[in-house]
Image (cartoon, coloured by chain):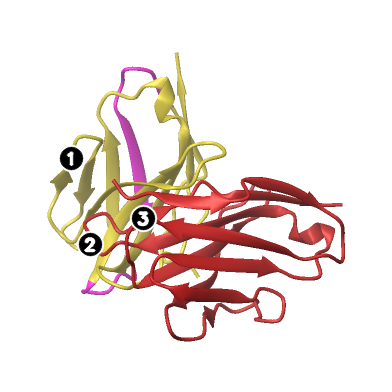
Chain colours: A yellow, B red
Amino acid sequence: DAKTTQPPSMDCAEGRAANLPCNHSTISGNEYVYWYRQIHSQGPQYIIHGLKNNETNEMASLIITEDRKSSTLILPHATLRDTAVYYCIVRVARGGKLIFGQGTELSVKP
Amino acid sequence: SAVISQKPSRDICQRGTSLTIQCQVDSQVTMMFWYRQQPGQSLTLIATANQGSEATYESGFVIDKFPISRPNLTFSTLTVSNMSPEDSSIYLCSADYDRVGGYTFGSGTRLTVV
């Protein structure tokens, strides 16, 4: 079973920041938080991952709480092309299976 | 970036028949994975395929229904056997390229069973 809980859907205005929350209260010390997204009819795409520090790359920022029980994915300037299902997954860094939960369906609106 | 090719991209099959889906990766990988995504649902892991050993199946999936081959480090196949309409799904393969970012996914095979 997935070890994460996400809201089923969210809306965001184009150009605004999209903040997608994820709860992972049973995360183990050696498990990372990964975020993927799936744009309609495509395979999932990696976005970002982190262990306990906040992370940023060209796509997004990841904020992990100090107790590591929750995290937030931030898309700083959402565009219509960011409309997708976003999955938060916890797994070990190497060799761990990716178990998908239900994800959050993000709709970016003009 | 890593490239995974899946064939066929889509197919319509008669119930009771079998379909083999191929997954080719562009460099050697240790672990490959097969997922099923039923209409409107999330991805469900079917099995993990390591080269040189039998695939490891998740609960609810059995080898007789979903036989998997992994003949080398760049290729794997998934067969959906004795198909019924309930097998209509998107089937995706994934590979662990052992690099930052975790796994890369193919674009999927959209299977319709009639």
> To which chain does the residue with label 1 belong?
A
Inspect the magenta stretch and tell me whether residue A61 lies in it.
Answer: no
Residues under labels 1 and 3: Cα distance? 25 Å
Q: Nearer the viewer, residue B39 or B47?
A: B47
The reply to whether discs 3 and 2 touch (Cβ–Cβ < 8 Å) is no
User: Where is residue B83 shown, x and y percent of the image?
Assistant: 80, 65
Q: Is residue B46 visible?
A: yes
Tell which tag, 1 or 3, sits nearer the viewer: 3
Q: Looking at the picture, how far across and down is residue B34, in whole percent?
A: 53, 65
Tell me if residue A64 comes above or below residue A81 in the rendering.
Answer: below
The residue where tag 2 is placed is A68
**Which circle's residue, 1 or 2, is located before the other in the chain?**
1
- Residue on which disc 1 sits: A57
Residue at x-position 53% and y-position 52%: B6
> Splitting the image into 4 quarters, where does residue A91 fall?
bottom left
Marks 1 and 3 close (CB-CB < 8 Å)? no
Residue A30: give its label.
none
Q: Secondary structure at mark 2?
A: loop
Residue matched to label 3 = B26
